[in-house]
Amino acid sequence: MKKICIVVGARPNFVKVAPLMRAISKADGATCSLVFAGCEDDPTLEPSLFEDLQMPRPDFYLGVDSQRLNEITSRVMAEFDRWLDEYPTDVVVVVDDLASTMAAAIVTKKRGLKLAHLVAGTRSFDITMPKEINRLVIDALSDYLFTAGVRSNSVATREQSEASQTFMVGNILMDTLRHNLPRLKQPAIEGVDLSQTPYLVLTLNRRALLDDQAQLKAMLDVVVGSGLDIVAPLRGEARHIVGTLCGDAPNLHLTDALPYLEFGWLTAHAMGVITDSGNVAEEATFNQVPCITLNSYTEHQETVSVGTNVLVGGNQEALSQAVAQLTAHEWKPGALPERWDGRTAERIVQILLG
């Protein structure tokens, strides 16, 4: 019986591991433990998240709650090392590119265990970004590099000494989307009838964008200047900053972050999405909804080359042009990238148990 441990470090990771846990539970010859690097009372892990994803809460919590990246790394390394003393495992699966992900990867390899990286090969090619360093370290250590697309596959293969370690399994986020499509729920947003009124969805989380409030104000002015209703489900500081800069705009509807199924409905039925999130851009491509990304790069290039995503960075003029095209229904056509078929988790389990 192969013992598999999945380590997650933040809320978005759960969306990606839910289908993997389902696939492992159906497979013969494997057991699975889910370990969360944070605390049991983490406010982003509301009960509805696990109900919506139809998955259990973590089996174990490492209890690391720091905001300092190097402290997170050291504390997760210490706590995960202790966890492995008590719970031996054969394979550790880590997700994405967080400091906690890198920490678990380092401990795994120091113990001589097999390491699998879910969503490997993603690169911004900006070494000043902490997440880029995390990606380089995790991919270099991994025995299994599970990539989402052709570009990520070529990066991972080029950087690894063994091409046989790289597997283009597809985008696991699509497994979750396809599984939950019939279960999406229309949210209630005060001041706008979502079923009757065209609207845009705005999400913001990127630190660099939130810190430059002069630039952010200029870009928000473009968005609210579209004249469409703007629904902005934002957490904490992002909601406060946007409310301070633009809260008096009558067509801007600030709301708390929504449960997974409600947010999925909101973006699937939107006229367009404006975001700085790669995951949201991927979902927009799946839903064939126009997407404007407020970054100058994307780790998932297929959302731009094949899908509905356009990058505008922090360029106010590029954003204005993109919003004008979107509202005029002149958006480029999009298609589904290769292997966005909802079978990624099955492929991963076949490889791990092969």
Image (spheres, rainbow, N blue to C red):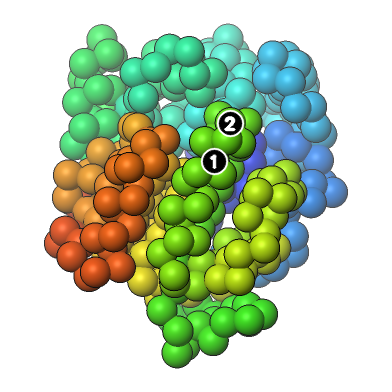
Name the image quarter holding the C terminus. Answer: top left
Residue at image coords 33%, 57%: 323
Amino acid type, callout 1: Leu
Q: Are marks 2 and 1 in contact (CB under 8 Å)?
A: yes
Residue at image coords 45%, 89%: 196
Q: Which residue is mark 1?
A: 216
Secondary element under disc 2, as helix, strand or loop, is: loop
Residue at image coords 63%, 81%: 191
- Where residue 34 sits, quadrant-wise, is top right
Q: Which residue is mark 2?
A: 212
Amino acid type, callout 2: Asp
Check the image and name the residue furthest to the right.
41
Question: With 41 as the anchor, is 255 left or right in this view?
Answer: left
Horizontal and vertical percent position of residue 135:
44, 21
In the image, 119 versus 291, the foreground residue is 291
Horizontal and vertical percent position of residue 89:
60, 30
Is residue 139 placed above or below 213 in the rendered structure?
Answer: above
Horizontal and vertical percent position of residue 102:
56, 21
Question: For the residue carrying disc 1, how many other residues have a C-alpha within 10 Å: few (<14), some (14-19), or many (20+)?
Answer: many
